[in-house]
Image (cartoon, helix red, strand yellow):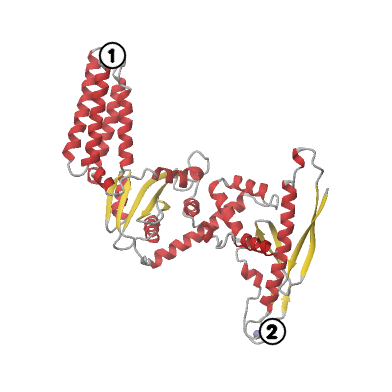
Amino acid sequence: MQWILKLERIDETGVLQSRTIGHIERPELASEADLGLTHEGGKYLIRQIQAEVTCDQVQAFIAKARICSSCDRARPIKDHRRRKIDTIFGHLRLHAPRYEDCRCGASNAASPVGALFPHRSTPELRYLQAKLGSVYSYRQAATILNEFLPDIGSFNPATTRNRVMAVGKVIEEEIQAEIATRPLAEKPVEQMTVGIDGAFVRAASSKNQRRHFEIVLGKIEPLEQSSKVFAAVRDLDAHARERVRSALRTAGRGPTTRLTVLSDGEDAMRLMAGQWLNGQVEHRLDWFHLRRRMEWLGRSLSWTIDYADPDSQTLQATYQRSLHSVRRNLWHHGRSRHGRWLIALSHLGAQILSHHNATHDAGGDPARIREAYKRFQDLERYTRGNIRSLMDYGRAWHHGEPISTAHIESTVNQIINHRMCKKRQMRWSRWGAQMMLHVRTAYLNGNLERVCGLSRPNAMILTNAAMLKAI
Ligand SMILES: [Zn+2]
């Protein structure tokens, strides 16, 4: 069977122009593979349509741009050139004439097509390349683009990488401009919660022989506004602090904003909260991390029990009660009454030790109990070390205050692990890692379209639908 594909264009004067742009030849339906267009056939046709549509657009554009904006006369043509422009549906060579300045003396763009496409690509393609390049390896991203887009074989890992880096650079320039001016938020938010965490990526071998870079990243949750993520390469980077501050300002932090920082309580993070985020900052130990340590201890304790022993149930109940008491006292009185949870904790410690001694005296193997005791000591060190950052979690929770950033873990996974984690053999330069982080966070924050210059993603489709309705 055969079809002829025609493209009809209605120009401004209402004249219909019809052009044949392709033939479709498909067998009669005899097997499942015969149905409809083939992948390659579809790609070919869409490329033809793209070439026709862009050709018409460019012709109209250069004719208009030739006219002098001050005296309305056509400018003399200097020469005819071609300019390569990459689009989603094909790499085009557009007619790009250069014009002389008008005789009236007014100066307009010498090469209007060149001026219109400074990146030699469309925003949609830049967005797609940056998005795929930030999710998959550059090689995988290039393979996917080659597979599905009409120009076969024209994408490679290097062009994908360059695209991601270029988009990252645009974001970097925006951030540097923000840091230089430090504009005050128009409507600063009253309250803002920031969950902070750290992660490592492999460093490219360099003179200073660093094996990993530390990334500081987090999630900003302004009151009654959508959350945003941020990430900055921390090592050796004097800008990291400014980047994080900038991210907070952009999310609406003003001089009066109350800032609550939640972290897992590691020294570096506590220090950062104090020194980097000056102003009204309250650092809180994340309940999620605290609870998780108690859960680890609970599991460890249950492995110490010998269930053949007739007293095992009593022992299990004792441990559960003691652990519950620690947990309840931390939850209700973490800040206001340190005594309570400290007593509950030391009580639990004493129980483990006495269990250990009894097992030892009876000739049993106390290895697992020693393990559990180590876990217990971890928890004790951790809570005592963070004693200033503990809070009355129950009360805060009841008042709707932030106590946990359980989802910070998933934020870390979203930003780092898929693309930059240590399992992949990818090594990063400091600059390369920061650019990739810019693109990934922009994507997660819903900013990537804008940064790539894609302001009206659906305009074309909507117009076409409207046109079809009109017909
Ligand atoms: Zn003129």
How many residues crowd around disc 2 within 10 Å: few (fewer than 14), some, or many (20 or more)?
Answer: few
Name the image quarter holding residue 127.
bottom right
429 or 102, which is in the foreground?
Answer: 102
Distance Cα–Cα, label 2 vs label 1: 102 Å
* Place of residue 438 in the rendered image (x, y in percent of width and height, measured from the top left): 48, 54
Horizontal arrangement in the rendering, residue 347 relative to residue 13 (left or right): left
Horizontal arrangement in the rendering, residue 409 relative to residue 460 (left or right): left
SS type, badge 1: loop
Can you say which quadrant of the picture contains the C terminus?
bottom right
Is residue 202 in view? no
**Residue at the spot of label 1:** 309
How many residues crowd around disc 1 within 10 Å: few (fewer than 14), some, or many (20 or more)?
Answer: few
Identify the residue shown where x is 27% and y is 22%: 316
Identify the residue shown where x is 17% and y is 37%: 340
Is residue 343 in view? yes
* Place of residue 255 in the rendered image (x, y in percent of width and height, measured from the top left): 30, 63
**Residue at the spot of label 2:** 73
Disc ID at residue 255: none
Horizontal arrangement in the rendering, residue 277 relative to residue 341 (left or right): right
- Residue that extends furthest to the front in the rendered view of this protein: 470
